[in-house]
Amino acid sequence: MWAQRPFTALMWSGAFERHPNLKYILTEVGVGWMIEKLRVLEFKAADPIFKHFTKDLSKSPTGYYEQNCFIGASFLRPHEAKFKDEIGVEKIMWGTDYPHLEGTWPSTMKELQETFGNYPEQEIRDMLGLNAARIYGFDVDKLAPIASEIGPTIAQIRGEA
Amino acid sequence: MSDRYLVISSDGHAGPRPEIYRDYLDPSYREEFDRQNEARMKALELAGERLEMRQESQQWASDKAHGLAGAWDGGRRNEVLDADGVAAEILFVDGLTEENSPPFGGDLGLMPVGVDPDHQWAGCRAHNRWMSAFCSESPERRYGLALIAPFWGVEKAVAEIVWAKENGLRGIMLPHMFTGQDPYHHPKYDPMWRACEERDMVIHFHSGAAPMHEYYGLDIFRARDPEQLAEPPVEMPGALGIYVTEVAWWLTRPLVYMIWGGVFERFPTLKTAVTEGSTIWVPELLHLMDQRYGDHHFSAKLGTGYKKHLSMKPSEYFKRNIKVGSSAMSRREAELRHEIGLGTIMWGSDYPHPEGTWPSTQKMMVEVLGGLPDEDITAILGGNAAEFYGFDVAALQPLVDRIGPEKSQFRTE
């Protein structure tokens, strides 16, 4: 996949090794494939034939994924959200893709209910906004007044209100 | 019930030395062959030096000259296969890469770039003629493949497929790189698919070719011109790692094009094999294509027209029409066999290439497949290939009884 190629190049070339704080965000490219992709990369990295070009890499492919990668999960669907623990809840940043046709608008609330309705409250808060706030450095205190005015409530996402 | 396994290698390579290819070339191309040969051998040498694993390959080959001659010597080849426990094999081009590539770009990559179409066809035909003769020495053991260059006129491709079938070859190899050419979902290729389906000629794609400048940088174009070699090319960290990660992706792209293009819908008994790209990508690719086929939300922008010509899910065409040659298979792939598809995997040795299993074939087979149920080992080592290619199993049985790996080795007590 074209969307997977930059990760492959950054990982193997040692860019993530040399720049451990570099943040690489994959947006609107689906999420389920990352687990499979890492499995393939681990398979290659473990092959003794390729030993001498993994010698400058201190981590495994999964290690670099954990260190440098985050997921812009546009219109995260229930079948993708179920992989959240393998992907890492702390990496997932929900997105609407507004104003694109394939995005959640104008049925955003309905989509949020379908995808997140059954998950623990803290995970919902993390995936909907707190992860993005941390990763991009949004000022949460400044956003708090507007969030309390227009943000969806947990009860709404659970379909209870 | 035999106490030995029928082993069919889905990946063998054979080809003669350049001077022999010269004899099989149409005479009108021999002068040009002589003009290009020296430069070509030098270029192959240079390309080999660029490979970071060059030294390992040379060291590996240093004490194996006798067995390596099986790349072109039929008697020697049977000797090697007997010792490996391999009864039969599918034969691709590219015996020993540095010495046995056909001329004029008629090689394993069959790249449609930087070649003269007539010359590339002449190189392909020289190889096909040699391969036909080579297979006729041991027809029950050697299923040879014809090189087909489909981008220079589909009617020429069809004519060569007809010739190949009439001359004992069992399938064809097509390039998986279609750089600058119409890709494989173009309907103009239908006569080629039909010619293969009607003659039960299995289509093959073999790993290797890729856009090398995307790994080694644009310097590799300059490196071909000695006058520009004054500055050494910039070393690109991780180039080979990126290449080996992506190489199977280039290899498998034609499957995506053929499945979505409805090729297997229109030609339901057309058979296709992809070889030496491992099998580890199969679950991911099938999951992705089925997801795109079935996910209505994703397809909101696309409508439904993009799949109305398909009567089945992509994974169903894959299971029906496609097999995967697993060269020097790993234990990890054996453990994942049900996810990959037990009926999909065809073990391969890749002899005489250095990354293959020879000369430790039987030892590696046991390491990879030991402890699996007998019927799974039977399918992977030879059963799947026997059925797919229609090998004459009865004719091979006396050979299997003599040289096949003993089943007892694979049992763990």
Image: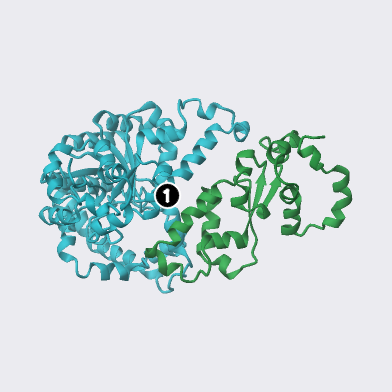
Chain colours: A green, B cyan
Q: Looking at the rendering, in which quadrant would you find the N terminus of chain B?
A: top left
Task: Determine the residue positioned at 86% across, 52% down.
Answer: A144
Q: Nearer the viewer, residue B211 or B398?
A: B398
Quadrant of residue B49 within the rendered picture: bottom left
A75 up-or-down from B80: above or below: above
Residue extending farthest front = B413
Secondary structure under tag 1 reads: loop
Residue A1 picture location, percent across and down: 51, 47
Report the amino acid beneath label 1. Answer: Ile
Q: Could one spot residue A20 in this view of the protein?
A: yes
Residue B67 picture location, percent across and down: 16, 61
Q: Could one spot residue B216 in this view of the protein?
A: no
Q: Looking at the rendering, in which quadrant would you find the C terminus of chain B?
A: bottom left
Quadrant of residue B274 within the rendered picture: top left
Residue B29 picture location, percent across and down: 19, 50
Q: Nearer the viewer, residue B124 or A54?
A: A54
Q: How many marks?
A: 1
| Chain where mark 1 sits | B
Residue A36 picture location, percent across and down: 51, 49
Q: Nearer the viewer, residue B113 or B270?
A: B270
B233 up-or-down from A8: above or below: below
Task: Determine the residue positioned at 61% across, 36% down.
Answer: B298
B180 up-or-down from B220: above or below: above
Give left or right: position of A61 versus A122. left
Disc 1 marks which residue?
Answer: B280
Neighbor class of circle 1 (other Cα within 10 Å; few <14, some 14-19, many 20+) is: many
Give left or right: position of B274 versus B131. right
